[in-house]
Image (cartoon, rainbow, N blue to C red):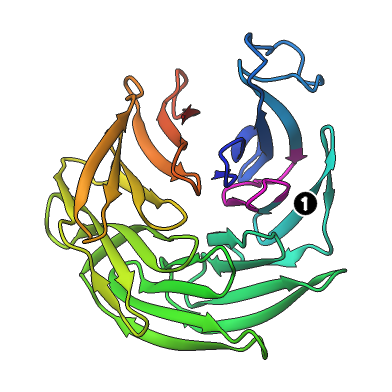
Amino acid sequence: MSISADGTIVAFGATNLTTNALYEASGEVSIYQYDSSKTTAQLSNGALATYGPAGWNRIGRIQSTEQIGIRVSLSANGKTIAFSGPNYIKVYSYGGGTTWNQMGSTISGTQYGMRSLKMSANGFSLVQLGHDAFTNMTFHEWNGSNWIESIILNGINNGAKATMSYDGKTIVINNDINNSYMRTYTRDSSTGAWSQINAFAPWLGTVKNLMLSSNGKVLISANTPSNTPQMKVQLYAWSGTQWYSINNSLSYEINDAGYCAASASINSDGTRFTWSKFGIIDIYDLNATGLITYSSSAPAVASVHGRVVLMNSVGTSTITATQTNGSGSGTITGALTITQ
């Protein structure tokens, strides 16, 4: 899922909607826009532009017979969207009403889909990280008519996470699902070349989530330390040459690592962040000395877990994806909760 900078446009994917045969399932990507004048839900006619819950209208719906939308990323204004397919990426731009048009050719991906997908603020560049073992991290830039690819890093082990700043000039990646070795890359504005400027190993354990602030100056991670019943949220600030830890990192004792702090998110300038723990979305502020202070807690979603949480750039809205078992055998249902 993804959220625009001002929090008024959200996008998400849904897969396994219908199963026709073994390993074959359909999917769709939906885009909604906030409408303060809409006071009642309209869920009876999906063809209408007013379809959606109270306060939200569906302005886009991209459907496929394949599993699309496992990874989704919006531009800052919410008018450009990139989403993953089984082994590809497609990018669409908003054409008004409920119309979305594909930008350029379909971008080739990896056999098993995307581990990470992040679009820049202007919607003209994106970074992808495949799900295959020993995959590549690739950068794609719009040249006015199509997407131009450049490979930043080869042979990344399965499980790595990647994040990119909003200006598309800084990328941070952890090298392996069980190895927190971090690498930072920046792009030369004149030549377009990428170069590694920093590497460090802050912890051992599984990285659940990794995100840069929009300006690329603050990094947040949610991870499971090795051999501990904890989830940990850690923040780092960029000194100009290296990352240094911001004090008072957060940890939480858990019984099920899959449901706590699976995600953490940060606003544009790195002064506010949010993380999930068992359906409760906590929000924290950072002051000038780096001290973490509790700000507020978004309402918990009853009987479900906060699987993924995102904060908009100005730190005024959060969107939470929740998951629970469905009524049928082996079925899973999900929902989004938006808090302002």
Q: Is residue 209 above or below residue 200?
A: above
Quarter assignment of residue 45: top right
The quadrant of the image that shows the N terminus is: top right
Tell me, yes or no, if residue 228 can be seen here. yes
Q: Is residue 77 magenta?
A: yes
Q: Determine the residue positioned at 29% across, 72% down.
A: 180
Say left or right for 176 vs 126.
Answer: left
Provide residue 33's location: percent of width, then percent of height.
Answer: 67, 31
Quarter assignment of residue 270: bottom left
Q: Which residue is mark 1?
A: 92
Residue span colored magenta? 62-80
Q: Determine the residue positioned at 74% across, 56% down.
A: 91
Provide residue 260's location: percent of width, then percent of height.
Answer: 27, 42
Query: Toward the viewer: 29 or 331?
Result: 29
Q: Is residue 263 magenta?
A: no
Residue type of the residue flagged with mark 1: Tyr
**Badge 1: how crowded within 10 Å, few (<14), some, or many (20+)?**
some
Tell me, yes or no, if residue 279 can be seen here. no
